Image: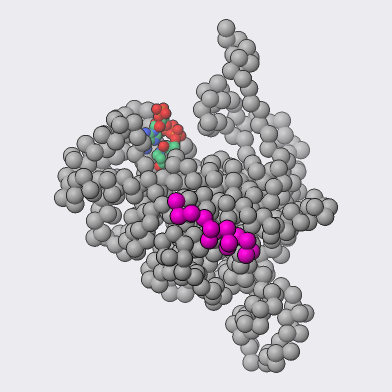
Amino acid sequence: STNLKDVLAAEIPEQIREIKEFRSKHNNTVVGDVTVDKVYGGMRGILGLATETSLLDPEEGIRFRGLSIPECQKMLPSAPGGAEPLPEGLFWLMVTGKVPSEAQVKALSKGQVVNEKMFLTLLYVYGCDLTCWGDDYWSNCVDLTGFVLTNTSIFQEWANRADLPSHVVTMLNNFPANLHPMAQFSAAIIACNSESKFAKAYSEGVKKAAYWEYTYEDALDLIAKLPTIAAIIYRNLYRDGTSVGAIDPNKDWAANFVSMLGYEDPQFVELMRLYLTIHTDHEGGNVSAHACHLVASALSDNYLSYGAGMCGLAGPLHGLANQEVLVFLNKVMNELGQGYTLDQLKEFVWKTLKSGQVVPGYGHAVLRKTDPRYTCQREFALKHLPEDPMFKLVSDLYKVVPDILLELGKVKNPWPNVDAHSGVLLQYYNMMEMNYYTVLFGVSRALGCMASTIWDRALGLPIERPKSITTKALMKKVGFS
Ligand code: CMX
């Protein structure tokens, strides 16, 4: 089937059965320990969450349902004429655990017929001739009757769920220009709560077994609306409030987003396909994913929980680091100019550290090697912008920063993370507004968080409530006096 919801519905009972059997045998098996250090250390290393969508290996980096980034680049469908994976494909993979076909990915971006009877009636009413369509029946149906269907809400997927409620548009248009784009983004997401199908169904007493179905609908609605929200913010702040235009159901999610932002360059569309794919998910414990999961565990709907996740992404130690990196790179360029030497770079980095600041884009709570999300952006740059001076600076920093952080002694991972590279690529395609970069990250992260939230509901996970302790009680517990 090309209908994601049907494919998912078929997966859920087997997954529930498997976990039930596993837990019946191993619920009391010990899988980790908690030291006093971990209690004070941001719970680093405590195994306490089941997240199905991706797994982070400290040495190798992220794998989405078992696939590394290079494998995703090879195996996930790309757009016609393009080379980078479509984010829709990764969403399908994260939700179902299976690599989608091109038709499945197309159906997700563009929509598909979910009510065959109504569809056939419409074809009849509009006088369409079914006989000439041959083998490619459904995709031709989609092409030929796109107008009819998109105007009758038979299409259910991303291109057709993107409209915003008018109160959200009004709210966005009234935000002052000095409100950070991430604050605008989080607030607008939360305000879409008025549209939640889950909240409505819950208030009408829907059974627990059906929670996931409404959560699924909210998840797809939210993913579809995010580019519209993000593009309105961009246009209001940086393009005099010009219109974002209409969604084109023939374009994929990233291509529509790019054109709503007001860009045309096909290479920039390719970059965004890659960007929106690699920022989706980084297992469950990072601030944005965990905040989303935590809030959703109270049965808050997807808009409330993802809004909470985005408030976390807006922090400088997490998603805001991509903005901080650009500020840092510009400072280097302003102070040293393009003709800097590596020794001058080293001196600049030491000066940053000695003034008590971190080197943005370097380090990670879990990773202990160069982030493969950095590497694939580097490869993109080597292919498309090898001579760009800012790319050269990023490459030169890669030569000097790790040794300096190692010399500092306390940094557990001296290697670059995803945020060290993304800003330079965006600038190359003339997106200069670095305050906005984290919003792009936020559009992408929805794919991972929403796939996880659907599974949280399908598996009926309980409200999250780890135990905390006072220092006095902890001292007593370990016999410290
Ligand atoms: N520059 C300077 N100091 C750094 C550092 C860096 N890039 N990375 C870590 N350190 C310091 C920490 O601040 C900490 O110092 P104190 O003990 O004085 O507080 C010490 O090294 C140990 O930290 P750690 O265990 O190596 O790292 P954490 O797990 O505590 O933090 C992270 C991880 C990402 C917050 C940290 O490496 C950092 O601040 N990096 C720069 C910001 C950044 O790039 N964030 C983006 C991460 C990716 C993402 O989530 O989007």
Provide residue 71's location: percent of width, then percent of height.
47, 57
Residue 8: quadrant of the picture: bottom right
Provide residue 178's location: percent of width, then percent of height.
44, 51
Q: How many marks?
A: 0
Residue 459 inside the magenta-drawn segment: no
Question: Relative to 241, is 323 above or below?
Answer: above
Residue at horizontal 48 percent and vertical 42 percent from the top = 315
The N terminus: image quadrant: bottom right
Nearest the viewer among 168 and 225 is: 168
The C terminus: image quadrant: top right
Question: Relative to 172, is 320 above or below?
Answer: above
Question: Relative to 77, is 450 above or below?
Answer: above
Residue 153: quadrant of the picture: bottom right
Going by the picture, which residue comes out furthest to the top?
Answer: 481
Residue at horizontal 47 percent and vertical 38 percent from the top = 366
Provide residue 157's location: percent of width, then percent of height.
63, 68
Please identify the dominant SS of the magenta region: helix
Residue 166 inside the magenta-drawn segment: yes
Residue 350: quadrant of the picture: top left
Q: Is residue 99 visible?
A: no
Provide residue 320's location: percent of width, then percent of height.
44, 46
Residue at horizontal 55 percent and vertical 72 percent from the top = 247
Nearest the viewer among 156 and 261 is: 261
Look at the image and give the residue range highlighted in magenta: 165-178
Taking the image in four quarters, ligand 1 sits in the one at top left
Nearest the viewer among 53 and 364 is: 364
Residue at horizontal 34 percent and vertical 64 percent from the top = 429
